[in-house]
Amino acid sequence: MKANMGTADKIIRVLIALVVGVLIYTDVLTGTLAIVLGVLAIVFVLTSLVSFCPLYTLFGLKTCKTKE
C-alpha cells in the first residue's frame, strides 16, 4: 500500500469524523443515520492513520506529494 493521501486530506477527514462523533454523542444524530455516519467516520479516521484510501486507487486519485 503506497500512501495516496496528503496532509490536508487527512486533516479534513479527521475533522469530519470528530464533528460526526460529537453530533452522535450529543444525540443530534440518531438511528440509522447515526450508525451509517459513525461507520463512515471510523473509516475516515482509519484511512487517515494509514494515509491510504482504497477508493482513491480505484479512481486514480492521489493527494500526497510525490518525491521526484
Image: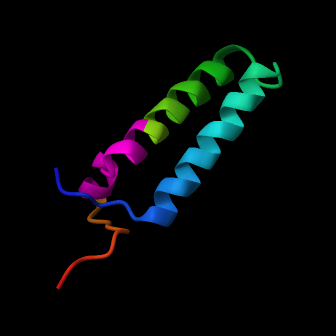
Residue depicted at x 36% and y 60% = 5
User: What's the colour scheme?
Assistant: rainbow
Would residue 57 be found to the left or right of residue 33 on screen? left
> Residue 39, how many percent across, how many down?
51, 26
Residue depicted at x 17% and y 85% = 68
Would residue 34 be found to the left or right of residue 13 on screen? right
Residue depicted at x 25% and y 58% = 3
> Residue 36, how many percent across, how many down?
57, 25
Residue depicted at x 76% and y 29% = 23
Start and end of the magenta stretch? 46-58
**What is the residue that sits farthest to the top in this orientation?**
31
Q: Is residue 59 above or below residue 48?
A: below
Q: Is residue 13 above or below residue 29?
A: below
- Which of 67/24 is in front? 67
Q: Is residue 58 above or below residue 36?
A: below
> Residue 48, how many percent across, how many down?
42, 47
Residue 57 colored in magenta in the image:
yes
Q: Is residue 68 above or below residue 51?
A: below
Q: Quadrant of residue 11?
A: bottom right
Residue 53 colored in magenta in the image:
yes
> Residue 25, how many percent across, how many down?
75, 20
Would residue 18 be found to the left or right of residue 1 on screen? right
Q: Quadrant of residue 34?
A: top right
**What is the residue that sits farthest to the bottom in this orientation?**
68
- Tally of numbered discs: 0
- Which of 33/9 is in front? 9
Helix, strand or loop: magenta stretch = helix
